[in-house]
């Protein structure tokens, strides 16, 4: 029987692309949704070449109407949405006292509002259709530790963690599971650029802080993400799984020291 589709926000790059590929390998048609056509086209070419069914949806997760249109397109093409992965994010390192209202708004809008828009859009359809479903929200360990230099992202990810637990409680009776995953540091293009660790020498220093002495690969994080969002663990809901090589136990890197110039170029 045909499986329902999986929507992956930010599915054209980095971790989102790795999750889309792994879900495709597990037999799900994937809908990748993000702002930039070039990200989506390149990813769709790659995934299609690997035999995965893909639909692209140009969509800014901050815009409720664009989110609705993306879910409509997914249902029109694949009949039903079964899984949602809220992976899209925006982030940059900034001193809290210098963060502008629009900078705060941009990151909160993508991370917190975007996750809410997609979750409510698919959740209300599943409830109306009497269908089960599963949502996975990608957060970061600083949602519970806090971190210096990224107060907008920390606050938004903490909100997403609270949303995860709350929706799990409300929607469990409808057969809807809602979980979160907190990855460790991965070398993905925009994250490494925006957060200042594109230099391999900086990556090597970061790896030394990790108990397992290496950074995470998108593939290993994606594998766990797919285990959690698919029906492999049907009794898990309202939880957050961490896949960070033990880093959060040592303390998240202090990015404020980077913007203050204490860590050099
Ligand atoms: C040295 C040690 C390093 C260790 C690091 C380890 C950390 C690892 C893991 C951390 C966990 C989480 C990671 C992530 O979330 S990674 C995701 C990264 N990917 C992206 O960010 C991609 C998408 N990003 C964007 O599109 C943009 O960056 C942005 C988020 C800004 C949104 O784009 P949008 O087009 O909507 O916004 P604008 O460009 O119009 O800007 C809006 C306002 O934000 C201000 N801004 C933007 N960039 C910065 C900056 N670098 N510093 C300060 N302010 C910034 C911008 O000026 C606008 O405000 P104003 O109008 O007031 O000027
Ligand atoms: N990299 C890391 O070390 C860590 C990452 N994470 C989390 O993992 C997830 C993936 O990050 P990663 O792969 O590294 O980074 P990427 O920058 O590659 O992924 C972010 C994705 O979000 C999309 N996106 C950004 N803004 C919007 C928007 N307004 N509407 C729709 N899509 C948007 C981007 O696509 P487009 O530009 O086309 O819109 C991009 O595909 C994020 O949730 C991040 O917070 C957590 C811990 C560590």
Image (spheres, rainbow, N blue to C red):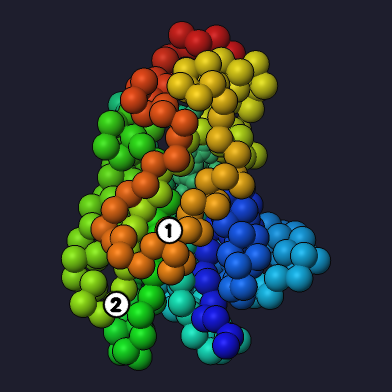
Q: Which mark is residue 43?
A: none
Identify the residue at image location x=49%, y=51%: 224
Instruction: Judge whether 32 appears above or below 1 on screen.
Output: above
CA neighbours of label 1 inside 10 A, class few (<14), some (14 to 19), many (20+): many
Position of 243 with respect to 55 (left or right) is left
Q: Which residue is mark 2?
A: 175
Point out residue 174 in the picture as x, y percentages from the top left corner: 25, 80
- Quadrant for the N terminus, please: bottom right
Q: Quadrant of residue 114?
A: bottom left
User: Regarding mark 1 in the picture, which secondary structure is present there?
Assistant: helix
59 vs 75, nearest the viewer: 75
Point out residue 210 in the picture as x, y percentages from the top left corner: 47, 22
Point out residue 158 in the picture as x, y percentages from the top left corner: 28, 45
User: Regarding mark 2 in the picture, which secondary structure is present there?
Assistant: loop
Say which label, 1 or 2, has the lower sequence index.
2
Label 1, ligand 2: CB separation under 8 Å:
no
Labels 1 & 2 near each other (Cβ < 8 A): no
Q: Is residue 156 visible?
A: no
Identify the residue at image location x=36%, y=53%: 180
- Quadrant for the C terminus, please: top right
CA neighbours of label 2 inside 10 A, class few (<14), some (14 to 19), many (20+): some
Q: Quadrant of residue 35?
A: bottom right
6 vs 107, nearest the viewer: 6
Instruction: Judge whether 69 appears above or below 193 on screen.
Output: below
Position of 177 with respect to 243 (left or right) is left
Q: Which mark is residue 228?
A: 1
Instruction: Judge whether 16 appears above or below 44 on screen.
Output: above
Position of 36 with respect to 173 (left or right) is right
Identify the residue at image location x=29%, y=84%: 127
Position of 173 with respect to 184 (left or right) is left
The single residue placed furthest to the right in the displayed view is 49
């Amino acid at each position: 029987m045909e499986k329902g589709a999986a929507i992956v926000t930010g599915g054209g790059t980095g971790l989102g692309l790795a999750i889309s590929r792994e879900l495709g390998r597990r037999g799900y048609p994937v809908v990748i949704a993000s702002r930039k056509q070039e990200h989506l086209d390149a990813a769709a070419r790659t995934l299609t070449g690997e035999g995965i069914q893909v639909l692209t949806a140009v969509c800014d997760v901050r815009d409720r109407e664009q989110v609705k249109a993306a879910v409509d397109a997914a249902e029109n093409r694949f009949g039903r949405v079964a899984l949602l992965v809220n992976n899209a994010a925006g982030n940059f390192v900034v001193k809290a006292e210098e963060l502008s209202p629009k900078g705060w708004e941009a990151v909160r809008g993508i991370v917190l509002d975007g996750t809410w828009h997609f979750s409510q859009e698919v959740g209300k359809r599943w409830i109306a259709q009497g269908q089960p479903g599963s949502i996975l929200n990608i957060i970061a360990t600083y949602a519970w530790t806090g971190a210096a230099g990224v107060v907008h992202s920390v606050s938004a990810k903490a909100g997403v963690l609270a949303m995860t637990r709350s929706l799990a409680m409300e929607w469990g009776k409808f057969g809807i599971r809602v979980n979160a995953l907190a990855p460790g540091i991965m070398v993905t293009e925009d994250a490494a650029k925006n957060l200042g660790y594109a230099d391999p020498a900086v990556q090597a220093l970061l790896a030394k802080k990790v108990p397992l002495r290496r950074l995470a690969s998108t593939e290993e994080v994606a594998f766990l993400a797919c285990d959690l969002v698919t029906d492999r663990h049907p009794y898990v809901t309202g939880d957050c799984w961490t896949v960070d090589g033990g880093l959060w136990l040592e303390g998240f890197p202090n990015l404020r020291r980077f913007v203050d110039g204490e860590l050099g170029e």
